[in-house]
Image (cartoon, rainbow, N blue to C red):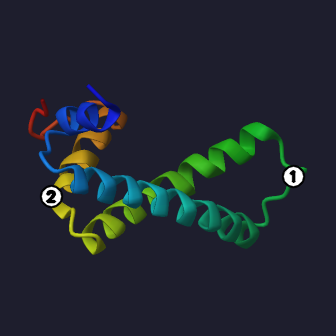
Amino acid sequence: MGIIDKLKTRWGIKSTFQVFIILIVFACTGFTALFAREFVFDLLGVTDEFPFWQRALIWIVTILPLYNLFLYIYGVLFGQREFFTLFLKKTLGRIIPGKKNTAKKEA
């Protein structure tokens, strides 16, 4: 069983083409988040002189929510709204304490 087949099983999808589209969405999102970090940090005046823990905290508070937003936007643009809606519900269910995971159980 190859990696593509494992991803299809894990994500509950049938098409190899859909796996490639989803991987492209993740790549575009990561690339956009990279540029967003630079923009947001410049906007907030965050420099390398800031202690690591402060930069990490600012990253978590600003870029992590933006990443999820970018992920959903790219998912919609690439025609994978349903997959990324469930993916984000599952992910946010793990991050937000006390929130029940309402996403469908995936294979």
Point out the residue furthest to the left here.
104
Q: Who's the residue at 28% across and 49% down the image? A: 88
Along the line of sight, the residue nearer the viewer: 105 or 45: 105
Residue placed under numbered mark 2 in the picture: 82
**Residue 54 appears at what percent x and percent y?**
73, 44
Along the line of sight, the residue nearer the viewer: 77 or 99: 77
**Residue 96 appears at what percent x and percent y?**
33, 37
Q: Who's the residue at 63% across and 67% down the image? A: 35
Per the image, label 1 sits on a secondary structure element best described as loop
**In the shown orientation, is residue 95 left or right of residue 42?**
left
Tell me: residue 77, above or below residue 101.
below
- Contact between labelled residues 1 and 2, with CB atoms less than 8 Å apart: no
Per the image, label 2 sits on a secondary structure element best described as helix
- For label 1, the crowd category at 10 Å Cα-Cα, with few meaning under 14, some 14 to 19 and many 20 or more, is few
Q: Who's the residue at 64% across and 51% down the image? A: 58
The quarter holding residue 70 reads: bottom left
Q: Which mark is residue 13?
A: none
Question: Between disc 2 and disc 1, whose residue precedes?
Answer: 1
Residue placed under numbered mark 1 in the picture: 48
What is the CA distance from the residue labelled 2 to the residue labelled 1? 39 Å
Along the line of sight, the residue nearer the viewer: 45 or 84: 84
- For label 2, the crowd category at 10 Å Cα-Cα, with few meaning under 14, some 14 to 19 and many 20 or more, is few
Figure quadrant of the C terminus: top left
**Residue 1 appears at what percent x and percent y?**
26, 25
**In the shown orientation, is residue 66 left or right of residue 34?**
left
Q: Amino acid at mark 1?
A: Asp
**In the shown orientation, is residue 37 left or right of residue 12?**
right
**Taking the image as drawn, is residue 71 in sight?**
yes
Q: Who's the residue at 22% across and 49% down the image? A: 16
Q: Amino acid at mark 2?
A: Glu
The quarter holding residue 90 reads: top left
Point out the residue furthest to the right here.
49
